[in-house]
Amino acid sequence: MNFLKNKSILITGGIGPCCNLVGRKTSIGNIQDSSIEEIWNGSKMSNLRDGFRNNNPNKICKLCIKSQEINI
């Protein structure tokens, strides 16, 4: 689960759950509004983790997993 190790912080302060280009566009918060700890423990990141725990990641994560399987 790469998203547990890597985050993207954009110049605008937006934080993506992973380093993947698509994932960077999936905002889980903004460091101008919340601390990284608050974002990490927030509902958006919690929902992402729960999706993986329940073997049902969100649509964006599924696309990334699929692209990795076919080595894009």
Image (tube, helix red, strand yellow):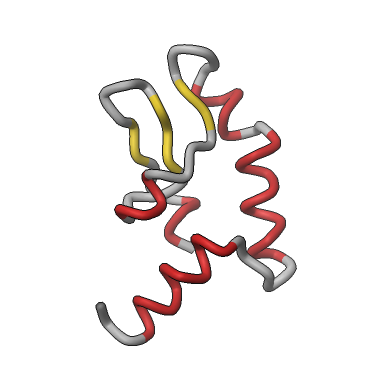
* The one of 55 and 27 positioned closer to us in this rendering: 27
Where 69 sits versus 41, above or below? below
Quadrant in which the C terminus is drawn: bottom left
What is the x, y in percent for residue 50? 71, 56
What is the x, y in percent for residue 56? 68, 69
Where 54 sits versus 43, above or below? below
* The one of 72 and 41 positioned closer to us in this rendering: 72
Judge from the rendering whether residue 2 lies leftward or rightward of residue 11; answer left or right. Answer: right
Judge from the rendering whether residue 56 lies leftward or rightward of residue 32; answer left or right. Answer: right
What is the x, y in percent for residue 9? 34, 32
Q: Which residue is pictured at 47% across the width and 23% down the height?
A: 30
What is the x, y in percent for residue 52? 64, 64
Q: Using the rendered view, name the quadrant where residue 64 is placed.
A: bottom left
Where 32 sits versus 17, above or below? above
Q: Which residue is pictured at 62% across the width and 52% down the height?
A: 48
Which residue is outermost to the top?
A: 32
Which residue is outermost to the bottom?
A: 70
